[in-house]
Image (tube, rainbow, N blue to C red):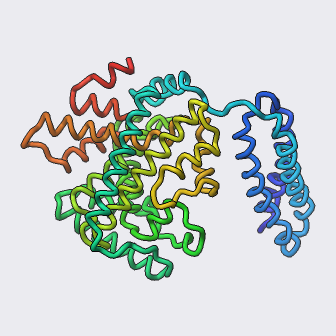
Amino acid sequence: MDAEQIDAYRVRLRALPKILAQGKANIVLAEAKRDMALLGIRSMEREGMLVGELVPRFQEHHPELVADAEAAFAAVQDYRDWIKDNLHLMTAPTGVGVENFNWWAKNVWLMPYTWDEAWALARREWDRNMATLRLEENGNLDLPPLVPMTDPMEYLQAYTDAEDELLRFLRERGFDSLADGYETLGDVRIPASTSWIGRPMPFFTNLIARNPKMNIIHEDIGHGLDSVRPMDHLSPIRSARRLYESTHPRWEGFGGGIEEMLMYAGVYDESPGRRARELQVLEFTYEAARAMGELKFIANQVDYAGWNQFEADNTPRGWAIADSSSMWNHKRDAVRAPGYQVAYPVGRSQFEKIVAERAHQLGDDFNMPDLIDEILDAGLIPFALVHWELTGLTDEVDKLW
């Protein structure tokens, strides 16, 4: 590092103890949320490990930073211990409550569903996909199971093959704009990482390790195009993601909707075979379980640990592990942006509603690739507004107004 970089490290290291000391002063113990404290303990253990790893490196290469690194490490450890010592006083409920969630969903996210309606949608998605999973499994009894890949070279080859198969499939089925968009994504594409190989297998790793095509569809075709296509829109409102994740239900609804649409179109009927359909339906089952767990958490019916356990209990195959880091980490936004997990099945339901209404309106003139282009061209606005614009129907926006 040069002198400027060393100074930058020194400033950050010296700031950390001050920030944590201010954190102690800011927290009113009687108002502190126990679940947030538990997350803080986990975060401090992770942060402490990272800061602690700097000390021997600085001892070898930059001894002038060792004292600051040791002080920062000690501050992180002290803050973690302070949380643990006061955890018994931090008893405030963490969920925002049903009334606050309903206000947030309507006024910030423009999502035209109350807590009760979102629960009904999520529960219906869980019922439907759990049943569909068992039907798929029964229809595939004569096929060998998909096993997770553990060889990095095997996975990278499977990833390349999946990309080629997907592009060919999209062009054969008339989704040329999706294929063209994928080929022009460039750096927006999610790289074919093998960093997960050899690590404990959380839920999504279990999916990716068996079939990389699903992740390509969701992240690159779904989210990638949803990021790039609206950038060309003349409207500054339609061309960028909004604050407070207000387009999150539309974002995840489109990604999940594309997955389901291509599954029914036959994208998994080739390599690695129809067993891959089970993985897609299993993902939707898990997302519905996450959403129901979050809704119970929002209503303060369960805490974080109860939410995790609910997900684990309602996800088939035992791939959702209640105390895993992945289960805890995806809940970090549950207070700042309640409904983050609810948005997956609810957003996909809104996507399906647009497809259903346009198919009904157009009859034999309906064309699925054209509708996907219309949704993308509408820009990154909530699905309730896309539904109003494309169908002319006001039932969703009437609930918002």
What residue is rendered at 84% in x and 56% in y? 10
Image location (x, y in percent) of residue 296 = 54, 35
Quarter-wise, where is residue 2 in the image?
Answer: bottom right
Query: Can you name the residue that lies furthest to the right here?
Result: 67
Quarter-wise, where is residue 110 in the image?
Answer: top left
Q: Is residue 313 left or right of residue 328?
A: left
Question: Above or below — where is 341 with respect to 216?
Answer: above
Between 202 and 127, which is closer to the camera in this rendering?
127
Question: Above or below — where is 201 with respect to 377?
Answer: below
Between 331 and 392, which is closer to the camera in this rendering?
331
Image location (x, y in percent) of residue 208 = 45, 66
Query: Can you name the residue that lies furthest to the top here?
Result: 401
User: In which quadrant will I find the C terminus?
Assistant: top left
Image location (x, y in percent) of residue 190 = 46, 62
Query: Can you name the residue that lies furthest to the left here?
Result: 364
Q: Is residue 246 left or right of residue 358?
A: right
Question: Above or below — where is 126 with respect to 325?
Answer: above
Question: Above or below — where is 348 with respect to 3?
Answer: above
